[in-house]
Amino acid sequence: MALIDNLVSYWKMDEVSGNRADSHASNTLTDTNTVASATGKIDLGADFEKTNSEVLTITDASQTGLDITGAFSFNCWLTLESSTGSNNTIVSKYTVANGKGYEIYIGTANWIQGNFTAADGSSSTGATNNSVIPDDGTFRMVTVTFTPSGSDRVKIYLNAAVQSIPSPTDSAWDIAATADPFCIGSRNGSAFYDGIIDECGIWDKVLTQSEIDQLYNGGAGLAYPLTTTAIKTLGGLAIGSVKTVGGLAIASVKTIGGLA
């Protein structure tokens, strides 16, 4: 399957400021409190300041497809600018009062955490990666997947390597669809992020290891539309298909008034 299959939305975060466009669908994110830009993993990234309560959001009424209740994947590149001893939310569609929906965040110990809760509130699962995210300005790729049934319901990947402590196996259930806004950089008005977030994609499927490897792209990242171009080489040099006549290469050249 192609990486673009089952992609719900993708935000390149290349805007200098203001709202961030959805490159794949219509879920444009509204800028609250002036999210600036900085050098991202690919072109620009959104630079969030926790102390200014900056966030990018879309209301539940305006969004399409972000109430993902079944198979789920989220991927982005990020840096952490400060370790404040408080949670830094990467993405959420989450009801804080009763803990329903989904959220991915860097916790107080600088570990990535993913939480997913069912509509009845009684079923939930989550995972925590086993590598600390330092506030060193280095871009890292974070991927979190959820599957509605089976073992290891939630998996967390750091730079395409699975990191999470396995989540428990329990009866099958779906994520709660909430009336809360979809947020990048906040948990619905709290736990704001401090750092740069770039190249964010969300899918209603579970990304495979092969697909995550493609997104990582050897550490270079992969921009929307998430395709790579294969180049054949011979002796380390790129080669192509060239037409010849009498051993000479030829090309088709357009002319205007007899001039090339």
Image: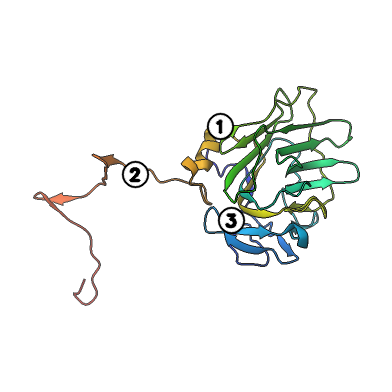
| Residue 173 vs residue 131, the one in the foreground | 131
Residue 167 vertical position relative to residue 88 in the rendered view, above or below: above
Kindly report the distance in space between the C-alpha atoms of the residues bearing marks 2 and 3.
25 Å
Q: Name the image colouring.
A: rainbow
Q: Report which residue position mark 1 lands on.
A: 209
Labels 2 & 3 near each other (Cβ < 8 A): no
Kindly report the distance in space between the C-alpha atoms of the residues bearing marks 2 and 1.
23 Å
Residue 110 vertical position relative to residue 200 in the rendered view, above or below: above
Q: Amino acid at mark 1?
A: Gln
In which quadrant of the rendered view does residue 18 lie?
A: bottom right
Number of numbered tags placed on the structure image: 3
User: Disc number at residue 231?
Assistant: 2
Query: Which badge, 1 or 3, comes first in the chain's sequence?
Result: 3
Q: Amino acid at mark 2?
A: Ile
Q: Position of residue 234 (x, y in %)?
A: 24, 40
Classify mark 1: helix, strand or loop.
helix
In which quadrant of the rendered view does residue 205 lie?
A: top right
Q: Position of residue 1 (x, y in %)?
A: 53, 36
Classify mark 3: helix, strand or loop.
loop
User: Disc number at residue 12?
Assistant: 3
**Direction from residue 257 to residue 100 in the image, left or right:** right
**Direction from residue 86 to residue 29 in the image, left or right:** left
Q: Amino acid at mark 3?
A: Lys
Q: Position of residue 148 (x, y in %)?
A: 74, 30
Kindly report the distance in space between the C-alpha atoms of the residues bearing marks 1 and 3.
22 Å
Q: Position of residue 28 (x, y in %)?
A: 68, 60
The residue depicted at 23 percent of the width and 71 percent of the height is 255
The residue depicted at 78 percent of the width and 26 percent of the height is 172
Classify mark 2: helix, strand or loop.
loop
Mark 3, Cα crowd under 10 Å, few <14 / some 14-19 / many 20+, is many
